[in-house]
Image (tube, coloured by chain):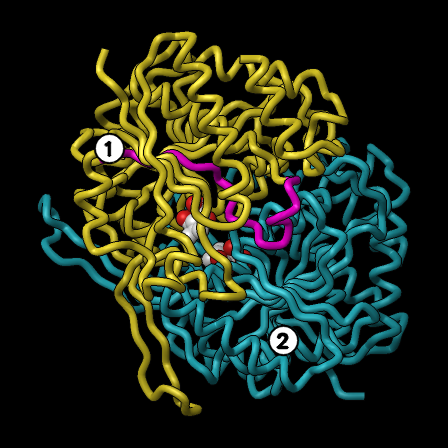
Chain colours: A cyan, B yellow
Amino acid sequence: QKTLKIAVVPGDGIGVEVTPFGVQCLQAIGEIYNIPLQFEEFDFASVPYYKKHGDMLPKDWKTTLSQFDAIYFGAVGMPDEVPDEVTLWGSLLKFRREFDQYVNLRPCRLIKGVKSPLADRKPGDIDFWIVRENTEGEYSSIGGKIFEGTDREIVMQETVMTRFGVDRILKYAFDLAQSRPRKRLTSATKSNGISTTMPWWDARVREMAKNYPDINVDKYHIDILTAHFVQKPDIFDVVVGSNLFGDILSDLGPACTGTIGIAPSANINPEGKFPSLFEPVHGSAPDIAGKGVANPVGMIWAGQMLLQHFGHTEAAEALLRAIENVLGRSQPDVLTADMGGKGSTQSLGEAIINEV
Amino acid sequence: QKTLKIAVVPGDGIGVEVTPFGVQCLQAIGEIYNIPLQFEEFDFASVPYYKKHGDMLPKDWKTTLSQFDAIYFGAVGMPDEVPDEVTLWGSLLKFRREFDQYVNLRPCRLIKGVKSPLADRKPGDIDFWIVRENTEGEYSSIGGKIFEGTDREIVMQETVMTRFGVDRILKYAFDLAQSRPRKRLTSATKSNGISTTMPWWDARVREMAKNYPDINVDKYHIDILTAHFVQKPDIFDVVVGSNLFGDILSDLGPACTGTIGIAPSANINPEGKFPSLFEPVHGSAPDIAGKGVANPVGMIWAGQMLLQHFGHTEAAEALLRAIENVLGRSQPDVLTADMGGKGSTQSLGEAIINEV
Ligand SMILES: CC(C)[C@H](C(=O)O)[C@@H](O)C(=O)O
Ligand SMILES: CC(C)[C@H](C(=O)O)[C@@H](O)C(=O)O
């Protein structure tokens, strides 16, 4: 068996708190299922590193991380100390772009024991995937200012979409939809208001759909789509969106299924040319950092996606079952505050490790 | 008393169906409160008009509509016949920009008789305003394609923010927050990912906040903000956002309070140099058009905002009470399907007119 080499990057805030539990879960699962895992931890991609070195990453970060199969990432940023755009574009967003992790895949599932803020929704009612374009679109690095500091000041930022970039994410999403029983794909658009990029996005969806005659395709403008997430989340199967729309939907979706504290995210380079990155959907959450109350499930579930990604299906399923079992028991002493419990990162993290 | 001249533009789809009930409500209220109202109806800004004339509007539309105090607008678009970007940029978005209706104001209130999809929320729990920038930002008309039709195709669209445009919408939002008991303002941002325009937006918010030391200001990235709309909508008072973010939030907010079918929207030129436009938040809804089942409340409530805007506070309050009374009675025969009833546009529209 080939050893999976994993670079562990805890980052900042609650990233640092949840990472150890994620790593321990992976180690436990690895032992049981005989998966050789090798971890190496790095202190870069964090505010303390930035303060010391004046940069988020060492010069040779790309060579260093390229030697790994995967990056297991906590969360980054301390906006009161360093602006978010500096920390994020200096680390996470750089990884996504430079390692061409063009698929951001996020499950949205209502699972037992997790209370949804929506009325009358039961476990199983909500079960879909969000496929987010992860390298271009609205997250562009092109933009600037003119007449800065004056009343005439104008600030511009370019949204950039390429046929190459859009077609490959659509293909990934259609393939995923085809692997699912309902075979339904929903495209997030805003072609009525954003008049150049989005009508073109719609055209690319129509074009790709021709290759998948068995897929049921629909599209909604992002505004009404967010409304449908709240009002009829059961209709979705695979939802595909641009970088920004995917970002929004993948916070809203998990919020509808209970808490974004349990949501995982895989930033995938499907060709395996570069390492893929696995992280919780939540951020570094400075407001609760240092208190030991952060929900470790997003991080642990991200580890589950890592196993799945590398074909360790049995181990991945066991880990998902362990998460579901622990949450399903709804023990207030175990669950964290975001789930209505009074437990800690440790109580919940250890419960899952023991369950494994 | 000065006569209020109102241009009625029903548009397409359910716009045409709900408009008459809105007009009748205004007429009834006008009679009771002695407000001289004068209506004139126009058939432009609709797909049939487009098909006949090859354009959404007559050449002299600006002169024609400038003679009115307000535009009372239904909804526009029939995407199966003419692409949305053509109909919208040819009418509604043109009005907003050319009449400098830079404030888009939308209430978000959980009212009695309207069932929220959120668990455990009561009437009164949710009550805030969304203030949306309505002329620039992500809805720009600058963009284009290169290498069209080839594998190298690139499509770009510019987001344009001006100090002039951003400062005036922020000022409006801060002023509104100051008039409210909780004095809280939330800014929608995405400065961690959208690295030129949004950090600058944040800086403008900080700058404007200096003039309002008594306002409690916070900001959330748009992704987590949509999550908060679902998980803790009670914390909001006034939410301000860019054109796109405001658009998204003002569909999501009404969805959280029950149905977007009741939500109104005022597109305001505060200086009164041009007519302001009042419309429901919903669109032309081709899927239910022609069936007589559309909810007329969004349109009627938009008329209420019109009265309020022109200082007819007593009449506006009476109309809002009439809406609340009818909805509060929760009569299945009266309410439309989106509210769980089996009534029609007519049953609900007439109930409100009678209540008035
Ligand atoms: C129809 C569409 C262009 C419009 C918008 O995006 O502004 C609508 O969604 C709205 O909110 O008024
Ligand atoms: C932290 C931020 C830049 C990031 C994003 O917008 O992509 C996050 O919200 C996410 O969803 O991974």
* Residue displayed at 65% across by 86% down: A211
Question: Can the viewer see residue B53 in this picture?
Answer: yes
- As drawn, is A75 to the left or to the right of B246? right
Answer above or below: position of A256 versus A278. above
Question: What type of secondary structure mainly makes up the magenta span?
Answer: loop
Report in which chain the residue with disc 1 lies: B
- Residue B309 appears in which quarter of the rendering? top left
Q: Is residue A41 visible?
A: no
- Residue B339: name its quadrant: top right
Between residue B189 and residue A17, name the one nearer to us.
B189
Q: Residues within 10 Å of mark 2 (few under 14, many from 20)?
A: many
- Nearer to the camera, B300 or B339: B300
- Per the image, the residue denoted by label 2 is A70
The picture places residue B289, in percent across and down from the top left corner, at 60, 49
Residue B186 in the image: state x and y as whole percent.
42, 33
Residue at 41% x, 91% y is B150
On the rendered structure, is A213 left or right of B156? right
Tell me which amino acid carries mark 2.
Ala
On whether residue B339 falls in the magenta region, the answer is no
* Residue beneath disc 1: B68
Quarter of the figure that contains the N terminus of chain B: top left
**What element does badge 1 sit on?**
loop
The percent position of residue B346, horizontal first and vertical second, equals 62, 31
Q: Nearer the viewer, residue A279 or A350?
A: A279
Name the amino acid, label 1.
Phe
Residue range highlighted in magenta: B275-293
* Closer to us: A258 or A281: A258
Q: Residues within 10 Å of mark 1 (few under 14, many from 20)?
A: some
Residue B280 lies within the magenta run = yes
